[in-house]
Amino acid sequence: MDDSLPKPARYALTVEYDGSQFNGWQVQAGVSTVQETLEAALSRVANHPVRVTGAGRTDTGVHATGQVAHFESSSPRSLRSWLKGANTLLPQGASILSVSPIGPNFHARFSATGRAYRYVIFNRPVAPTFLRSRVTWEYRPLDVSRMRAAAAFLVGRHDFNAYRAVACQSENSIRELRCLRVGASGQWIWVDAEAESFLQHMVRNIVGVLLAVGAGEKEPAWAGEVLNSRDRASGGVTAPPDGLYFAGASYPAPYELPTMPECRFW
């Protein structure tokens, strides 16, 4: 090893993106993904190949307002150069909100102690014109109080096997859902979910159940019955990806990341 070469520095990113423009986060051959797009832009700024690791691997169509990622580079670039240079090269569907130096042991995925998602529902009889791929439209009137009652059955540490995708590869389906709140304002309804980690499609399957309850198809207690069944077949329809946003990740005290203002358009 050549000791004269500068040691690579590690940087943390905060990223937002429109998931309808990408085939998910993770690099896949032949399609555009968020990870691949970020790596291409940062590699040009660094003038060497850059690998980006994210806190959450979002699916196709899922957005982010506070995705956290990290990368390493030995290139002597200022934080302003990383931020401005990469954003100049990124397509309109993605933006880097912040670049911060971070300790060498920081890992965007494995150092995270919590993750937060927000699911946004536009509730009116007529479909939205300008927000089709950015919210989930529900034409049936939804009873928010019933949705909140159903959500209460899911908070805590449980086996969420009935709320994960059939193809989910996680060996363990036990998760602690720290928070599941349903908010509303006018025609807007949103569901906030927080946990250390989530199973594949877990939030979308939870929202699918809450929608059925809110529309009066099922009683609030059904959310708990689905949970206790541990059988995905007993659950409701998986809610579309359009309304789901990766809102942020939390980390222990040694890792201080910039606090981003809440991004909302409703």
Image (cartoon, grey):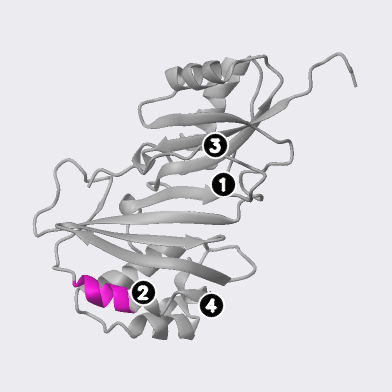
Q: Amino acid at mark 2?
A: Ala
Name the secondary structure under disc 4. strand
The nearer-to-camera label among 3 and 1 is: 1
State yes or no: residue 262 in magenta. no
Q: Label 1 belongs to which residue? A: 55
Residue 47's image quarter? top right
Q: Position of residue 245 (x, y in %)?
A: 38, 49
| Pointers 2 and 4 in contact (C-beta within 8 Å) | no
Tag 2 or tag 3, which sits nearer the N-term?
3
Q: Which residue is mark 3?
A: 29
Q: Nearer the viewer, mark 3 or mark 4?
A: 4
Nearest to N terminus: mark 2 or mark 4: 2
Q: Residue furthest front?
A: 253
- The tally of labels here is 4
Which residue does the numbered mark 2 point to in the structure image? 151
Numbered tag placed on residue 122 in the rendering: none
Comes first in the chain, label 2 or label 1:
1
Q: Contact, CB < 8 Å: mark 2 with mark 1?
A: no
**What type is the residue that disc 3 sits on?**
Ala
Instruction: Kindly report the distance in space between the C-alpha atoms of the residues bearing marks 4 and 1.
Output: 23 Å
Callouts 4 and 1 close, C-beta under 8 Å = no
Mark 2 and mark 1: Cα distance apart in space: 25 Å
Mark toward the start of the polypeptide (4 vs 1): 1
Query: How many angstroms separate mark 3 from mark 4 (CA)?
Result: 36 Å
Residue 129 appears in the picture as rendered: yes
Residue at image location 44% in from the left, 24% down from the top = 90
Of mark 3 and mark 4, the one earlier in the sequence is: 3
* Circle 4 residue: 158
Instruction: Say whether disc 3 or disc 1 marks the residue closer to the N-terminus.
Output: 3
Determine the main secondary structure of the stretch shown in magenta.
Answer: helix
